[in-house]
Amino acid sequence: MSANVQKNRMTRRVLAAAAGLATMGALVAAMPAGAHDRGHGHGHGHGHGHKPRTVDVQLLSFNDLHGNLEPPAGSAGNVSETQPDGTVKAIPAGGVEYLATSLRTARKGNPYSVTAAGGDMVGASPLLSGLFHDEPTIEALNGLDLDVTAVGNHEFDEGATELARLQNGGCHPVEGCYEKGRKFKGADFPYLAANVTKEKTGKPLLKPYTVWKKNGVKIGFIGVTLEGTPDIVTANGVKGLKFHDEVETINKYARELDRKGVKSIVALIHEGGAPASTSYNYDCDSPGAGDGISGPIVDIAKGITPKVDALVTGHTHQAYVCTVPDPSGKPRMVTSASSFGKLYTDTTLTYDRRTNDIVRTSVKSANHIVTRDQPKAADMTSLISRWNKLAAPIANKPQGWISADINGRGSTALEKPLGNVIADAQLEGLAPADKGGAEVAFMNPGGIRADLVHKASGSEGDGVVTYGEAFTVQPFTNMMNVVDLTGAQLVAALQQQVSGSNEASPKILQISRGLAYTLDLTKTGAARVVTDSIKLNGEAIDPARTYRVAMNEFLAGGGDGFPALGQGTNKLVGASDLDMFNAYLAAHSSATAPLAPPATDRITVVQ
């Protein structure tokens, strides 16, 4: 396959699935036979004698894998663990070779074991999976014996037709089959999307729920994604779809399962919260002031019917095992296992054979690190090696050099070093008059998916940034836009970082050099942005003046809760964000003069 063919593939992957929504109905019709009622048989039950009244069902769960088949690099691959003396230790974790071993080890001695996921298994994936439209990840999840997952917002990145293909199999409609003699089989577990319906028919896009059965034990799983998915996915990805309230949807299908005699129910919810500590072993139920969990999942959990026995959540990439009271006031387990396969949750559900329900008082749960000091699963090593050979000609090509780690995803700061590099790359690439005449550039923080790590990931040598590493940072291949915005709209956009839909969980845009302002977090809402501090190249923003602003097409469409950015006019479409990033690395670094991490002094934060 020529480099040009491969290059063309990369430039507009997002549009590849926009051919139409006609095959959406096939999702439900072609569900893999028996996928909804299989037990993996990890053990042989209690024999043929008298059955005890209760049986312990092991629920293993994880979320937000995002196609991270190989261990995530740098700080994005660490898990924080609080030590007995109160210090916090960073432990390298993740990678499906280790996740497979962890899950298989955990299942030993548990005859009743079911594995579920909370969404975003694919999408925003590193090159190893993303280059092949995430077929490698679906193949890996089949090998991990995943029983069921909810859809996440990223499952819609390439549209409903492509999601149908991931479920049902078949080669890519544009790129065909990747390996001679091999046809993509699709997921042998059901994707659930109870709160996603087709606008034309009002019917569910995917199965709303599934029932796992083994030896008379029945557990229903209802899967939903966050209602706000259309705000954080490109318009093409959600075309023709309607997203409904998570609580109302789960309660509706819990009643339906209850009527069918399924009394044990787990909700898989691609929405989450933020615990008071980022350590995975934090006691979320500790009673101190400011302890516990906050965020959207708290209100959702409080509204979900007591018929549901446990909630597996995701989306926020946080680690927590908390109890949140249900509407009757009884505590109920709410869990999330960080992201990228770094943790898994092991929950014990005690099933009462007489009532067919879970004994809530005995539900136990804990998160466990997927450590990298355990044996690798040979089948996963083989899978990674197979796909790496196909990706190597593109993945290994050097793009630039760095002198030290430049943190993006792994940075907890509001202004991230890698965010500054990306915004500067976009400004530089689009500043020439014939390229759009950009004066300032904005980058959404959620679009930065990894760190740039100095240590070599393969044989390229320390400090070398390969195409695969650059792609892992910006895997969406969004096209760049330059638009006209007034100074008033610019100020409104900065205020929308901390107000409106972003007030509870701020999304701080990464900004190009020359723009500076103060963010006062002691205030609330839009007032957090100190308007008279906003300056571009040393001059105050003029509300009436028109500015040329560069950003990716997602932000230019008002995505991530930035309606002001969607008001741009006189649009010029440029190259992809990834091409801009790689061009900047090539122009600003060499083996003898590598790019250093930039200063983070554009946003002054008052706390």
Image (cartoon, rainbow, N blue to C red):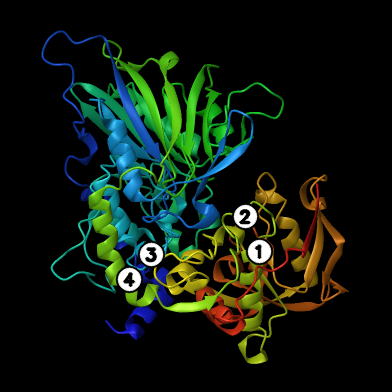
Task: State the separation of the CA atoms marked 2 and 3.
Answer: 23 Å
Task: State the separation of the CA atoms marked 3 and 4.
Answer: 10 Å
The mark nearer the N terminus, 1 or 2, is 2
Residue found at x 25% / y 48%: 142
The 10 Å Cα crowd at callout 1, few under 14, some 14 to 19, many 20 or more, is: many
**Front residue of 11 and 258:** 11
| Quadrant occupied by the N terminus | bottom left
Residue found at x 55% / y 53%: 75
Which residue position holds label 4? 391
The mark nearer the N terminus, 1 or 4, is 4
Q: Position of residue 34 (x, y in %)?
A: 17, 39
Contact (Cβ within 8 Å) of mark 3 with mark 4: no
Q: Position of residue 139 (x, y in %)?
A: 26, 54
Which mark, by number, is residue 417?
A: 1
The nearer-to-camera label among 2 and 3 is 2
Q: Position of residue 401 (x, y in %)?
A: 55, 75
Which residue position holds label 2? 411
What amino acid is found at the position of numbered circle 2 in the picture?
Answer: Ser
What amino acid is found at the position of numbered circle 1 in the picture?
Answer: Pro
Task: State the separation of the CA atoms marked 1 and 4.
Answer: 28 Å
Which residue position holds label 3? 130
SS type, badge 1 = helix
What amino acid is found at the position of numbered circle 3 in the picture?
Answer: Gly
SS type, badge 3 = helix
Task: State the separation of the CA atoms marked 2 and 4.
Answer: 28 Å
- The answer to whether residue 205 of the structure is visible from this angle is no
